[in-house]
């Protein structure tokens, strides 16, 4: 018998109601949901940054022309600066403002 069956979940729910009470249970579940959402966001951000750090530079980032093929007596080419970070999503800014209580101001 592996994993959680529906009977196990019902037993856990009954114990939670007995320990926390029916009035406090929705608040605890809401806090747990927020915690899990933040954890997922943090792990996906870390995974995305690791993926971006490990990704090789695309071939289109190198400028074509004389700078790509220096002559024997010229100075070495200087690498271009990395692209600017994308602007934040307006919907995410609004969610953060509501969560922080600033109301978007």
Image (cartoon, helix red, strand yellow):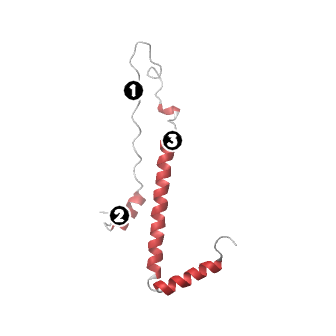
> What residue is at 33 percent from the left and 63 percent from the top?
104
**Residue at image mark 3:** 54
Q: Few, some or many C-alpha atoms within 10 Å of disc 3 (few <14, some 14-19, many ≥20)?
A: few
Labelled disc at residue 97: 2
Residue 89 in percent (x, y) is at 42, 55
> Between tags 2 and 1, which lies in front?
1
Labelled disc at residue 78: 1
Residue 34 in percent (x, y) is at 45, 68
Q: Does 55 appear above or below 8?
A: above
> What residue is at 47 percent from the left and 42 percent from the top?
53
Say whether disc 2 or disc 1 marks the residue closer to the N-terminus. Answer: 1
> Between tags 2 and 3, which lies in front?
3
Residue 38 in percent (x, y) is at 45, 63
**Mark 2 → mark 3, Cα distance in angstroms:** 32 Å
In the image, 94 versus 54, the foreground residue is: 54
> What residue is at 59 percent from the left and 82 percent from the top?
11
16 relative to 85 in the view: left or right:
right
């Amino acid at each position: 018998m592996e994993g959680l069956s529906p009977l196990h979940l019902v037993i856990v729910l009954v114990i939670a109601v007995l320990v926390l009470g029916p009035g406090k249970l929705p608040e605890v579940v809401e806090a747990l949901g927020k915690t899990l959402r933040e954890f997922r966001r943090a792990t996906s951000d870390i995974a995305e940054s690791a993926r971006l750090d490990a990704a090789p530079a695309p071939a289109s980032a190198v400028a074509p022309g004389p700078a790509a093929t220096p002559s024997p007596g010229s100075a070495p080419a200087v690498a271009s600066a990395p692209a600017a970070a994308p602007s934040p999503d307006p919907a995410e800014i609004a969610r953060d403002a509501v969560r922080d209580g600033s109301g978007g101001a």
